[in-house]
Amino acid sequence: MKFKAAIAAILTLGLCPALAFAAEAGEGQGSWLRLLFFTINFSAFVFIVVFYAGPFVKRFFHDRASSIRETLTRLENEEHRAEEAAQQAAARQARLDSDKTALAEEMRAETAREIDRLRNGAQANAARIKRDAELTAAAIAEGAKRQMRAHLAEVATKLARKLVVENLESSDQGRLVEDFMQRLHREEAKP
């Protein structure tokens, strides 16, 4: 096959210049010997080019075809990867909407839980403050009662001393004061 193609190329290239040369030549200027010489010369040139340059040309085109195939394969692979990445991006976009909705619901639920927790804490604090206020008021009232009893006892003691000093004799006074003081101490000891 290669040999036939080379012969066809040689004959085509060899005869075409001869036809052109024959067309230009005037009468008696061209000779068949000269045409044969050019044809043989050209055929030798083509043979040398094909024989020595043929493997390099063949290897060049083979390497070029291989690099083109590799490039096409690589581009097809990259195209598939790009399509997969586009599909993944579309899937992520679809998931993003659902994730956004889920996140919003989760935030609403967390906000509701936090509001309930704060409300319950505030109610507990209010109840504790009320209870503390009641206990403080009761303690203040009890302290005031004790102070009032102590003050009344002191005033009563002073008044009783004054009355005793003015109206009773010294023997009656001592006994009366002692008896009163014992009662007063018993009253102070009561809650």
Image (spheres, grey):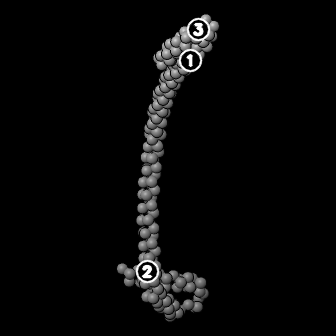
What's the mark number on residue 59?
2
Q: In front: mark 3 or mark 1?
A: 3
Question: Which of labels 2 and 1 is toward the front?
Answer: 1
Question: Which residue position holds label 1?
Answer: 150
Choose the circle earlier in sequence order: 2 or 3. Answer: 2
Residue 92 in view (yes/no): yes
* Residue furthest to the left: 1
- Amino acid of disc 2: Arg
The residue wearing badge 3 is 169
Q: Tell me the crowding category of disc 1: few under 14, some 14 to 19, or many 20 or more residues within 10 angstroms, Cα based.
A: some
> Element type at marker 2?
helix
Where does residue 110 sit, x and y in percent of width and height?
46, 35
Residue drawn 59% across and 84% down?
24
- Quarter where residue 78 is shown: bottom left
Which residue type does callout 3 highlight? Glu
**SS state under label 3:** loop
Mark toward the viewer: 2 or 3: 3
Give the residue type that dot 1 points to. Answer: Ala
Mark 3 vs mark 1, CA separation in Å? 27 Å
- Residue at 49%, 82% in the rendered image: 13
Q: From the viewer's perspective, is residue 108 above or below residue 16? A: above
